[in-house]
Image (cartoon, helix red, strand yellow):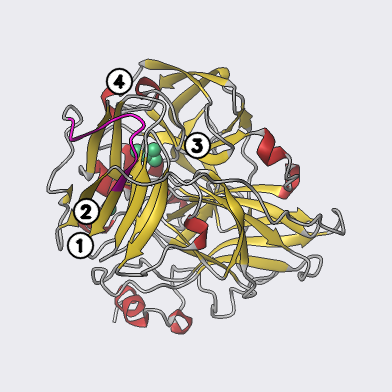
Amino acid sequence: MNRRHFLRLAGGGAAALACGGVQLLTSCGDGGTGPGSGVTRTPLPVPSTLTPTGATLTAAPGTATIASGETTPAWLFNGLLPSPTIRVRRGDTATIHLVNGIPEPTIVHWHGLIVPHEDDGHPLDAIDPGGSYDYDFPIVQRAGTLWYHPHPHGLTGGQVQRGLAGFFLVGDDEEDALALPSGEQEILLLLQDRAADAAHAFEYAPTADDLHTGILRDTAYGDGVRRPTVRVAGPRCRLRVLNASNARIYRLGLGNGAPLTVIGNDGGLLASPVQIDSVYLGVAERIDLLIDLTGVAVEGGLMLESLAFDMTAAPSGSTQGVEMELLEIVRAPGGDATAPPLPSTLSTIAPLGSPAGEREFAFQSSASGHTHTINGLTYDMNRVDEQIALGRVERWRFRNDSALPHPVHLHGTHFQVESREGGRGTVYPYEGGWKDTVLVMPLELVSVLVRFDPYRGVFPLHCHNMQHEDQGMMLNIEVV
Ligand code: C2O
Ligand code: CU
Ligand code: CU
């Protein structure tokens, strides 16, 4: 029995898994969740900060360090891995000069930012090698954990896989008033699953299976390094997690069984904090957590894990849904002994109100092979598929009749999740507030309320499984 077959049989009972490439929670003596447990972990790097006022962002080949003494060729923004974190405040203006130093067309999309069409990184705006593109847009939205990545049609998955993706953080006064942990107590975790060995970690060579399910690999990388570990002084930290994987979905949970405290998601703060045992994080979704280390001894560790989840409908051999260790958090000495209490109200979320219309989008994948469509259509970047009036509220229904998960993303706005029928059958409290990506698992029908404001223009709607989007699971929505 090969290992992939075994993983599949093990399903949710992953505790029984044999040792292999997968980082196991109950490993064969070489795992464990504390320091000194035998697994070599790499300190989580802190991304540098880029202020986007007259900034230049150059995408070019370079060398990534993925662990102590291990390097690999990669494609990098400004020569850096992790990519620089772009930080702005509401009311700022971003002026960014993008230079294409990679050997294929590219364009950068600011995922979750509400920007004019011409600043959105639409695939029509892709620039050739050696070209450049100038962005100039105001920050008109509330604080939130956004990100940026290439968006040329058909090439997004490969460029992200090779290293091009980073955080884009917006701050504002409302967030400041909460006095959330900051500085060294604010941890940014860009999650990707990759091959463990340096020779393959950042390569892009999708197999036929990868074109169907998306790329699924066995080892968690954080901010570009393999099996990350981070030291935190004091009893709590803010952990902002971005799933920048090609296809993998994580079900975040803590190794000590304590609940997670969620304070925000894609579009910023939730109305109030949510305590919950686990959080599904689909590709491109973000989650903002407060991690409580009061129960962890100094020099003790707490493991952020991906818990097993049911993917019985998935194709044979898929490792979607297996357990993984994601980030070891070690409590370091020092820091404030007492954490200030988290306010019970974080923000005010105004409901979008009654929809004036409704439309449905069916996400369909062939049972095998690599046909991935929406309403039977394959993306044509020059075609407008739907039109919606600026300011009009509509209910959009995302229907997944396939055996693969589809994380559905909409450019140009944020939406409110109303209901989920079939599959998991519920809207999780951490899916409240404003979202730009929602996970639609096999056989689920997710309804969201949408309104575009303030920009007219063409904005993509697509599955953010990067293989699916590259193969055309995308439509153009024109706001008129
Ligand atoms: Cu994160 Cu259309 O993309
Ligand atoms: Cu986007
Ligand atoms: Cu998909």
Q: What residue sits right under mark 2 in the picture?
A: 363
The amino acid type found where label 2 is placed reads: Phe
Q: Secondary structure at mark 4?
A: loop
Q: Position of residue 328 (x, y in %)?
A: 64, 62
Reply above or below: 63 against 242. Answer: above
Q: Quadrant of the C terminus?
A: top left
How far apart are the alpha carbons under marks 1 and 3?
Answer: 41 Å
Quadrant of res 212: bottom left
Q: Position of residue 131 (x, y in %)?
A: 35, 16
Residue occupied by mark 1: 401
Read off the magenta span.
Answer: 384-395
The label nearer to you, 3 versus 2, is 2
Question: Considering only order in the chain, which callout, 4 or 1, is on the residue closer to the N terminus?
Answer: 4
| Residue for point 35% across, 54% down | 247
Q: Are marks 1 and 3 in contact (CB under 8 Å)?
A: no
- Among the two numbered marks 1 and 3 on one chain, the one whose residue lies closer to the N terminus: 3
Disc 1/disc 4 C-alpha distance (Å): 37 Å
Q: Can residue 449 be seen in the rendering of this structure?
A: yes
Residue holding disc 3? 63
